[in-house]
Image: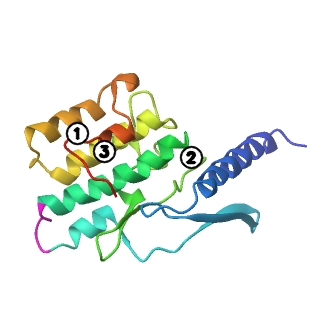
Amino acid sequence: RQRDDIPLTTQRKAFWHRTQEWRDLGEHPHLVSGYYTLEVGGRLRFFVHHVPARPLPVWLAGLAGPAPLPRRLDLAIQLASALELLQARQVAHGALRPSSCLVADDDTLRLSPSTSFAQGIEAAGMADYAAPEGTGKPPADVYAFGVILRELLAGQAAPALESLIVDCLERNPGARPTASELRDPNRPVVDRR
C-alpha cells in the first residue's frame, strides 16, 4: 500500500460521510434532495434530485433590471429556511455561496449540496464567503448568508436589515444569530413557510 492512498481514503470517507448527512436531511421545499452515492469510474459521485433552476447569480443577471426588493427578500427567507433545517440537524453546508442557491422560474430557491465536500476554500471559489474561523460549522453558514444577503440587497437595505447583515458578519461565531433567529418574528427577515 502506497502512502498516496491514505489521503484518498480519508477524502473518500469524508465525502461519503458528508453525502450521507445530506441524504439524511430528507425532503425540504428549499433543499435539493440527495439520493445516493456511488463509485463511478473510480470516483465517488453524489446523485441528487434534478432541479430545473438557475444559480442565483445567473438568475439575477437574467432579469431585465434589478429584482424588486420584496422578491430578493423572499429568496433570503427561503435560504434562511434551508439553513434552519441544516442547523437543526447540526449539519453545516460548508461551502455556501450564491452558486449553491438555485432559483426556479417560480422564484423558489433550493440550496444545493456542496460540490466541494473534500476541497479547500480556494478550490471551491469560497474565499469571499468564508467566515474568519473557516467553513464546516453552522455559524460559518450564517456568515456566508450575511454576505449573500448583502449582495442580494445591493445597498437597498433598511437599517434593520443592515443590522442583521452586520450581526451575520460578526467575527465571533458565537455572537452570530442562528438560522432560526434569522426567521424570528422579531427580526427583519421573517416568514413562516
Relative horizontal placement of residue 129, taking residue 191 as reference (left or right)? right
Q: Nearer the viewer, mark 2 or mark 3?
A: 3
Q: Amino acid at mark 3?
A: Arg
State the separation of the CA atoms marked 1 and 2.
34 Å
Q: Which mark is residue 119?
A: 2
Question: In the rendered view, would you say 148 is above or below 33?
Answer: above
Residues in magenta, as a range: 64-68
Query: Does residue 29 show up?
Result: yes
Q: Which residue shows up at 18% across the image and 72% down it?
A: 63
Q: Which residue shows up at 22% across the image and 32% down it?
A: 166
Q: Main secondary structure of the magenta part?
A: loop
Where, quadrant-wise, is the C terminus in this rendering? bottom left
Q: Amino acid at mark 2?
A: Gln
Tags 3 and 1 in contact by the CB under 8 Å rule?
yes
Q: Position of residue 175 (x, y in %)?
A: 34, 23
Magenta stretch holds residue 67? yes
Residue located beneath label 3 in the image: 183
Mark 3: give few (<14), some (14-19) or many (20+) Cα within 10 Å: many
